[in-house]
Amino acid sequence: MRLKGRRVLIVGVSKGLGYALAYFLLKEGASVVINSRNEEKLKEIKKSLESIGEITYVVGDVSTLEKAREVVEKAGNFTDLVVTVGGYIEDTVEDLKALDEMINNHIKIPLYVVHYSLSKLKEGSTIVLVSAIRGIYTAYPTQLSYAVGKAGLAKEVEILASELLSRGIRVVGIAPSFIDGDFVPDRDWKKLRKLGDFKAPPEDFARVIVWLLTEEAEWVNGVVIPVDGGARLKL
Ligand SMILES: NC(=O)c1ccc[n+]([C@@H]2O[C@H](COP(=O)([O-])OP(=O)(O)OC[C@H]3O[C@@H](n4cnc5c(N)ncnc54)[C@H](OP(=O)(O)O)[C@@H]3O)[C@@H](O)[C@H]2O)c1
């Protein structure tokens, strides 16, 4: 158990990455607070994982500074933070229909959440943000606002890490390729993909975040790690 005594807040939990992450964190001995706007989903996840360890939830939207403050306050104390808020809308410069939402979800929300979490995080804490391969490597021409948002988020990792060096707080990120489907506890997920596939089950991405939160990764800071099984090499 590599995370005994840690309490991790996961903001923006889906049935894919967020659920898998909560599962692996509990398995490592951490307690977990999960957040999203959908109480039914959070209840379901809590019910399926509560036999492994301590899991609580906070229902709430983090799309404005004020709302993010409420969620972070309700979460109580935590030692580490992971923001997995997503949202994927395609657009082009012809229509710009996703611009506001993608900039809000991928650039503003992580900053809102980190801003209010700073009063809880201490020396030795870690913040993990989730970019995307399409933000740091080649994007489709129809991914304008999404890729710009995820590229900005990758830059946030570097700048926040630099700012928080003096507090002893690490900021790191992952850039997933394609997170395929919902998480299913205790299955043999490795059978579902092979090295180099662009799509992989949530387990493959969640386990890297868990590692980033452990003491084993304490010398990794201010970088976004591509987590894609090497699929970007074929793009
Ligand atoms: N899926 C992929 O293939 C892929 C690829 C590359 C990167 N990523 C990134 O990896 C992360 C996880 O991916 P995912 O597919 O699990 O993401 P997702 O389902 O798009 O988003 C995660 C969850 O965030 C919650 N959320 C959205 N807006 C919110 C808000 N304002 N306040 C609180 N919660 C909010 C949603 O839950 P509620 O609706 O219940 O609030 C949603 O289920 C995301 O950052 C995503 O952009 C995903």
Image (tube, grey):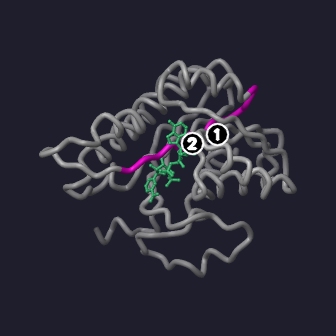
User: Which secondary structure is most common in the magenta stretch?
Assistant: loop
In this rendering, is residue 132 above or below 67? below
Q: Residue 182, how many percent across, how many down? A: 58, 64
Residue 118: name its quadrant.
top right
Please tell me the numbered disc located at residue 35. 1
Q: Is residue 10 left or right of residue 133?
A: right
- What's the residue type where badge 1 is placed? Asn
Dot 1 or dot 2: first in sequence order is 2
Disc 2 Cβ-to-ligand 1 distance below 8 Å: yes
In contact (CB < 8 Å): disc 1 and disc 2:
yes
Say which quadrant the C terminus sits in. Answer: bottom left
Q: Is residue 41 left or right of residue 193?
A: right
In this view, the residue in front, 14 or 172, is 14
- What's the residue type where badge 2 is placed? Gly
In this rendering, is residue 76 above or below 96? above
Residue topped by disc 2: 12
Q: Is residue 227 left or right of residue 2?
A: left
User: Magenta stretch containing residue 161, yes or no?
Assistant: no
Say which quadrant the N terminus sits in. Answer: bottom right
In this rendering, is residue 200 above or below 88? below
In this view, the residue in front, 56 or 176, is 56
Please tell me the numbered disc located at residue 96. none
Residue pictured at 64% horizontal, 26% vertical:
72
The extreme front residue here reads 40
Q: Which residues are magenta?
A: 76-88
In this view, the residue in front, 174 or 109, is 109
Residue pictured at 34% horizontal, 40% vertical:
149
Q: Residue 205, how many percent across, how many down? A: 55, 59
Q: Label 1: few (<14), some or many (≥20) within 10 Å?
A: many
Q: Residue 57, how many percent across, how many down? A: 73, 39
Residue pictured at 45% horizontal, 57% vertical:
176
